[in-house]
Image (spheres, rainbow, N blue to C red):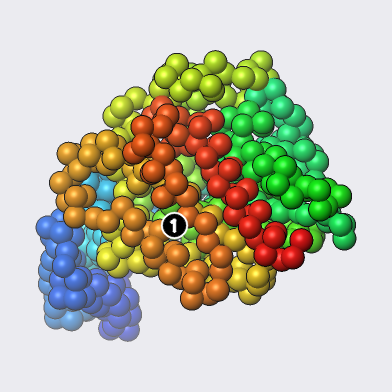
């Protein structure tokens, strides 16, 4: 049966029904607009959309009450559903464009508010059309049938693609497609395949850049390090800071134990959520003497915490199809523009020639790319901003949980970002953003240390050691235009960790 072209609301009861339905939309639009205008400090674009929503719905509501017996919706149920879908789709598209152009900040609350306001304004247009000219909306469907079909196919295609990608990411996570609301999916997507070659070294059966793990026996000394890409390392196995620490620790206290080992649970592109999962599900099963959680100031603070972010659809930039496409483009760009970084991990590169001489190293990024990345990460030092403080609170919740799980078996190692260590890089950031000069680069480390002291957690902050090395004229500890340590940085960090562990072991009476 074909869809009816229209169903006029002409009787008194149907007039009141239409009035109730449209009035609900009107009230929602007016309230949303007023809340933004009165309670917030909106940008001009958000304020304009709020005013449009208030005006359209306000006028529509007044006219609807006065002309309720002459209102004609003239739409079948399928058309109403399509209309609502188009309104939502256009609102999301408008928000996506506004965010991409920088007209609206990329904040989840602002994005959701803007989508709601745009949708409300569009609904207001239909309210006015239904009240001023009965049957106008149905006429639009008849005259713009080609646009109707195009919009319908586009909406259904994007929704279908989104569903397929979400299912794929949950069932078969990969570095391109994973369920971003799942801690486990992210971990499995980024974990190295077992026995993959990394600088000629075959990673273990768990996908970690280390030898095979073993559980602690009574006469063993076992430490487990949980980290992100700093644990995986952008250096060969023998140069990795965990390997350096293990070797130095064995030289210092090995005579007192049957085996001395530091297991490296490093997984690239992970954060505190994944660290907690690894501790609960893999690390504690080995019964280590100590667990080291390495927190990279550059991204573990702003992308850490225990709470998984719920999936949002306020802009297309947050949809799976957009994120997967962006990742694919980024990976291709790395292969094309950053060959030194792209080559890392191939089986035919065991010892890059620049390992022992950082001056021979080619840059991993362009100057513009690297400075843009560091400026983005610099937000971590703006600790007085409420949105940044919220990220610290999430991190502190995770530390509190780890302390309850591990008690005195927990050591937090703070890995500084390069802009905290390199004064010249900091000067470049200040030149691009003068407000950065008012920020304290050490503030993140200070906040985390204070929280660890309150929780009775041991801390090893590597910032003073690395900064002293650079200021004394030592070789660059980071890869050239890359935020990871080179062989120099790994050696400094490994020796510092081994020194702390040696002192800790002796303090236990062994």
**From the image, which quarter does the C terminus lie in?**
bottom right
Q: Is residue 453 visible?
A: yes
Find residue 278 and report its horizontal and vertical position in percent: 68, 56
Q: Nearer the viewer, residue 84 or 109?
A: 109
- Camera-nearest residue between 70 and 507: 507
Q: Quadrant of residue 135?
A: bottom left
Query: In this rendering, would 467 be left or right of 344?
Result: left
The percent position of residue 449, horizontal first and vertical second, equals 45, 65
Q: Is residue 273 visible?
A: no
Q: Residue at x 67, y 42 (%)?
A: 248
Closer to the camera, 20 or 164? 164
Residue bearing the label numbered 1: 301
Other-residue count near label 1 (Cα within 10 Å), few / some / many at <14 / 14–19 / ≥20? many
Judged left or right of residue 119, residue 161 is right
Quadrant housing residue 388: bottom left
Q: Is residue 488 above or below residue 143?
A: above
Q: Is 250 on the left-hand or right-hand side of 160?
A: right
Asked if 290 appears above or below 265 in the picture, the reply is: below
């Amino acid at each position: 049966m074909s869809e009816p072209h229209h169903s006029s609301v002409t009787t008194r009861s149907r007039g009141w029904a239409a009035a109730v339905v449209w009035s609900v939309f009107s009230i929602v639009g007016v309230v949303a607009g007023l809340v933004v205008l009165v309670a917030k400090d909106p940008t001009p674009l958000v304020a304009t959309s709020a005013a449009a929503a208030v005006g359209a719905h306000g006028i529509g509501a007044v006219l609807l009450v006065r002309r309720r017996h002459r209102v004609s919706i003239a739409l079948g149920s399928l058309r109403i559903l399509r209309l609502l879908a188009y309104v939502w789709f256009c609102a999301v598209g408008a928000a996506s464009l506004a965010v991409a152009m920088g007209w609206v900040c990329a904040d989840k609350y602002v994005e959701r508010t803007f989508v709601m306001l745009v949708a409300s304004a569009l609904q207001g247009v239909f309210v006015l059309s239904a009240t001023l000219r009965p049957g106008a909306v149905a006429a639009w469907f008849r005259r713009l049938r080609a646009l109707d079909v195009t919009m319908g196919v586009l909406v259904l295609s994007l929704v279908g693609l989104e569903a397929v990608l979400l299912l794929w990411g949950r069932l078969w996570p990969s570095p391109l497609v994973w369920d971003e609301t799942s801690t486990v999916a992210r971990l499995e997507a980024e974990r190295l395949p077992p026995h993959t070659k990394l600088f000629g070294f075959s990673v273990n059966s768990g996908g970690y850049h280390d030898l095979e793990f073993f559980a602690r026996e009574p006469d063993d000394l076992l430490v487990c390090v949980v980290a992100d890409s700093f644990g995986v390392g952008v250096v060969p196995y023998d140069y990795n800071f965990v390997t350096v620490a293990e070797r130095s620790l064995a030289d210092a206290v090995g005579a007192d134990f049957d085996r001395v080992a530091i297991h490296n649970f490093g997984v690239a592109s992970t954060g505190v959520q994944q660290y907690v999962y690894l501790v609960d599900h893999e690390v504690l099963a080995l019964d280590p003497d100590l667990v080291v959680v390495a927190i990279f100031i550059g991204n573990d603070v702003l992308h850490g915490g225990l709470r998984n972010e719920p999936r949002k659809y306020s802009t297309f930039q947050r949809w799976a199809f957009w994120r997967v496409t962006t990742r694919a483009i980024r990976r291709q760009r790395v292969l094309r523009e950053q060959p030194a970084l792209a080559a890392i991990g191939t089986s035919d590169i065991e010892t890059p020639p620049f390992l022992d001489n950082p001056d021979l190293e080619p840059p991993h990024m362009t100057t513009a790319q690297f400075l843009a990345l560091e400026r983005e990460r610099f937000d971590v030092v703006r600790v007085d901003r409420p949105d940044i403080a919220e990220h610290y609170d999430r991190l502190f919740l995770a530390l509190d949980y780890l302390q309850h799980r591990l008690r005195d078996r927990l050591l937090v190692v703070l890995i500084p970002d390069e802009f905290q260590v390199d004064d010249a890089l900091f000067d470049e950031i200040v030149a691009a953003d003068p407000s950065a000069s008012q920020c304290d680069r050490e503030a993140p480390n200070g906040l985390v240390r204070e929280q660890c002291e309150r929780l009775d957690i041991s801390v090893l902050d590597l910032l003073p050691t690395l900064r002293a090395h650079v200021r004394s004229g030592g070789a660059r500890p980071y890869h050239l235009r890359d935020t990871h340590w080179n062989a120099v940085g790994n050696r400094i960090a490994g020796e510092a960790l081994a020194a702390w562990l040696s002192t800790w072991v002796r303090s236990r009476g062994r």
